[in-house]
Amino acid sequence: MSALPPAYSHLRARFREAALLRSTEGVLGWDQETGMPAKAVAWRAGQMSYLSGQVHRLTTAPEVGAWLAACEAQGTASGAAAVNLRGWRRDYDRETKLPAELVEEFSLTTSAGMHAWAAARKASDFAAFQPVLEKLVRLCQEKADHLGWTSCRYDALMDIYEPGARSADIGALFADLGPRIAAMIGPAVEKAKSQPADLLAGHYPIAAQQAFNREVAEAIGFDFEAGRIDTTTHPFCTGLGPGDTRLTTRYDEADFFSSLYGVLHEAGHGLYDQGLPADEWGLPAGEAVSLGIHESQSRLWENHIGGSDAFWRHWHPRASHHFAGLNAFTPEQVAAAARQVSPSFIRVEADEVTYDQHIILRFQLERSLINGDLAVRDVPEAWNAGFRELLGLTVPDDARGCLQDIHWSMGSLGYFCTYSLGNLNASQLMRAARGAMPSLDADLERGVYQNLLAWLRTHIHSAGRSLDPQDLMVQATGGPTRAEYHLDYLKDKFL
């Protein structure tokens, strides 16, 4: 630090201040989804719009550019300082292209849009949401045009969430992945029929689910002195700062899997947040590198760990303690019940085999919307046609179709492909972890997760934004993200 110019200290203080405001906005967002009264929507939208505007002004002010130039001219940064300077430059160059008025309008529209979406979904009425979505698509197109793009406008939005990603590459990856998954669905459905889908049907009190979920989350390493679990309609995780990571889930008293796997998924995100360098919090060296890497952590713990036979062989006694009816079944039967395969309408309820087809559909639609090839009014028709093609189902209504996800109401277009990237990355990371730790499977049989978590801390969490996503995958696994490892994992597990 002593070799760096004073400008670096100014930058660090400025971006830490911006991070504090983002954290405050995050608390308001968490409250909005977990407990805010309905009549507070307009006021909350104004609060969040104000904070977004303030962050934008702080981080794009002319002095920030001058400080960056001073640091870059000296050229002596290394370690975390070099990571921070690279990250700040990338963010500054991007954000200075966006007018503050656009940032504020975007925030205002998304705050109101989430509640408009919730009402439209409840009524299964896309037409009620259409005007809001039209505005959000227009704002996203404006954002992309300000950011700049060459061959595909959608690339500008994807790069926000997955640095370096290009729709042509993702499209080619999905063109390979989709048909090979489609070929698995029929055989996997037939194999799953060997056990009744309703084998575990029963009553699972919410209090018992909460107790069991907490035990599991704590065992895999989630620190409850630095986090908590709450209830919401759409599960999510938000890292509000060092020592404050919030998980949410939802409960179904007829299906304890719903909340359990929701908690494992969000705890995977939470473990990543809790594993980032705390002394660099709010700065690039202390931030997650991308959503595709973030999603790999949630899918790894939810599916590769929580969905395994080894998991249920270890956890069956504790699950039976909380849910006495499970004593009637073997751990293998419980694990098989968690592996049921059946094409369904709702993405967050989809099984592992069919899940990526949901993402491929959303990627295709989003790219067409942003590139201007699909009008918002035609989304339901395009959705329903794509769903029939990819999953062979006729969508019964908008609530179980194009209105099911919250992301578009949040303005998060460019985001969905990261879910499938997360699946592919998770399979590749687990393969690399097994290669590095020959005793890993024995650890998992005994419910010992510390060694796997330590490996992830070393190879993923502690890296912050020191490398772009694909470079990080190469360093951690020996190669860039490939579909082959995930396809092998699905075949082994389901066929």
Image (cartoon, grey):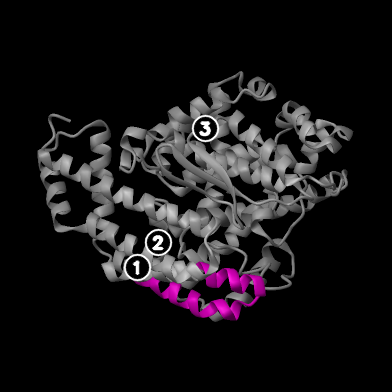
Q: Amino acid at mark 3?
A: Asp
Picture coordinates of residue 148, whole percent (x, y): 30, 65
Picture coordinates of residue 326, whole percent (x, y): 83, 36
N-terminal of the pair, mark 3 or mark 1, is 1
Does residue 408 appear left or right of residue 148 in this picture? right
- Can residue 119 be seen by looking at this rendering? yes
**450 above or below 14?**
above
Q: Amino acid at mark 1?
A: Lys
The residue at the point 78 percent across, 31 percent down is: 321
The residue at the point 75 percent across, 43 percent down is: 339
Q: Which residues fall within the magenta stretch?
A: 114-143
Does residue 196 appear left or right of residue 105 in this picture? right
Q: Amino acid at mark 2?
A: Leu
Mark 1 lies on residue: 143
Query: Can you say which quadrant of the picture contains the C terminus?
Result: top right
Does residue 272 appear left or right of residue 324 in this picture? left
Q: Nearer the viewer, residue 346 or 54?
A: 54
Asked if residue 337 is among those painted magenta in the image, a careful observer would answer no
Q: Nearer the viewer, residue 178 or 247?
A: 247
**Could you say which disc has been placed on residue 157 in the image?**
2
Label 1 secondary element: helix
Q: Tell me if label 3 and label 2 are in contact, CB under 8 Å.
A: no
The residue at the point 74 percent across, 57 percent down is: 343
Mark 3 lies on residue: 223
Residue neighbourhood size for the residue with mark 3, other residues' Cα within 10 Å, grouped as few (<14), some (14–19), many (≥20)? some
Mark 3 or mark 1, which is nearer to you?
A: 3
The residue at the point 27 percent across, 45 percent down is: 16
Picture coordinates of residue 380, whole percent (x, y): 62, 75
Q: Quadrant of residue 388?
A: bottom right
Picture coordinates of residue 359, whole percent (x, y): 58, 57
Q: Nearer the viewer, residue 183 or 440?
A: 440
N-terminal of the pair, mark 3 or mark 2, is 2
